[in-house]
Amino acid sequence: PASTPEADIRMDIYNGDGSRAEMCGNGIRAFARHLWDSGRFERAPLRVETLAGIRTCTPTDSEDRVRVDMGVPAFGLSAVGANLAHFPDESHAPLHNLVRGDWPMADVEAAHAVSMGNPHLVLFLPTRTDLNALPIESIGPLIERDPAFPSRINVEFVVLQDQTLHTRVWERGAGATQACGTGACAVAAAAIATGRAASPVTVQLPGGPLDIDWDGADILWMTGEAVHVFSGTLEPAAYTVWQERDNAT
């Protein structure tokens, strides 16, 4: 249950390494779809409490697509909890280019820190970049755990082609994933704020596209699929173990 009357239900997210995430854009769509399909809630706007705040999930005309209020993007080093001492020569204006010469890759055209309730570093790469050949499995962990980011950070690698933001993501605590909803929102927000793209924009991830709407000031909206693929059983004791481990750290 939710801890506040402003929400209908609470969602907790745990990464593959056991760490807790403030928010998950893909997870919240699946969560809402499951609650509607199971009959626990009427197929209507659903207010979900997360560590990043209350997010509202809205059904669409397509049963498989869910529209989510993802909150207002925040830009800059302070927004992602960075250690500012690691950026002594950088302006701390929200949309300053944060490329650092000691990061383990070349050809980064621009880097922007974006919070979607959780921290992201969006790296824009040249159009010629072959994202599929990019060794993010070796690059991602080094940036994720860079001392500049004490709470670690999600990393997005982005190539803009034909008005589509092609993206691969290295997720904090999970590694290379097929898709990242908050990451897609961070990519779109950075692209729109810097004039690289106009809203609405499509973010193409290995697992499929997400459509992002943002007016540049207020709530950013994400729309994407949530498709039932399997059912299973989770022992309650497992959740208790996760909570105890989380409280201990």
Image: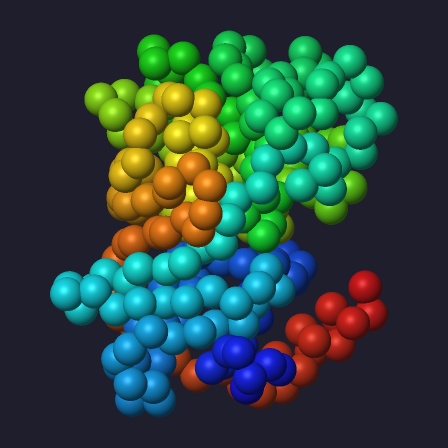
Image coordinates for residue 147, horizontal then vertical, percent: 79, 33
Display colour scheme: rainbow
Q: Nearer the viewer, residue 134 or 215?
A: 215
Residue 118 is situated, as x and y percent measured from the top left of the image, at 60, 50
In the depicted view, which residue is nearer to us: 137 or 68?
68
Total tally of numbered discs in the picture: 0
Regarding residue 175, the answer to whether it shows in the image is no
Image quarter (top left, top right, bottom left or bottom right) of the N terminus: bottom right
User: Taking 20 as reference, is 45 left or right?
Assistant: left
Q: Is residue 173 visible?
A: yes
Q: Is residue 91 left or right of residue 239?
A: right
Q: Residue at x 33, y 26 (%)?
A: 197
Q: Quadrant of residue 154?
A: top right
Is residue 101 positioned above or below 217 on the image? above
- Nearest the viewer among 84 and 199 is 199
Query: Residue 56: x, y in percent?
Result: 41, 67
Residue drawn at the location 32% of the way across and 44% of the way down: 213
Q: Nearer the viewer, residue 190 or 215?
A: 215
Give me the residue at 18% from left, 68% from top: 63
Q: Residue furthest left?
A: 61
Figure check: 116 above or below 13: above
Which part of the image, by quadrant, shows the C terminus? bottom right
Q: Quadrant of residue 40?
A: bottom left
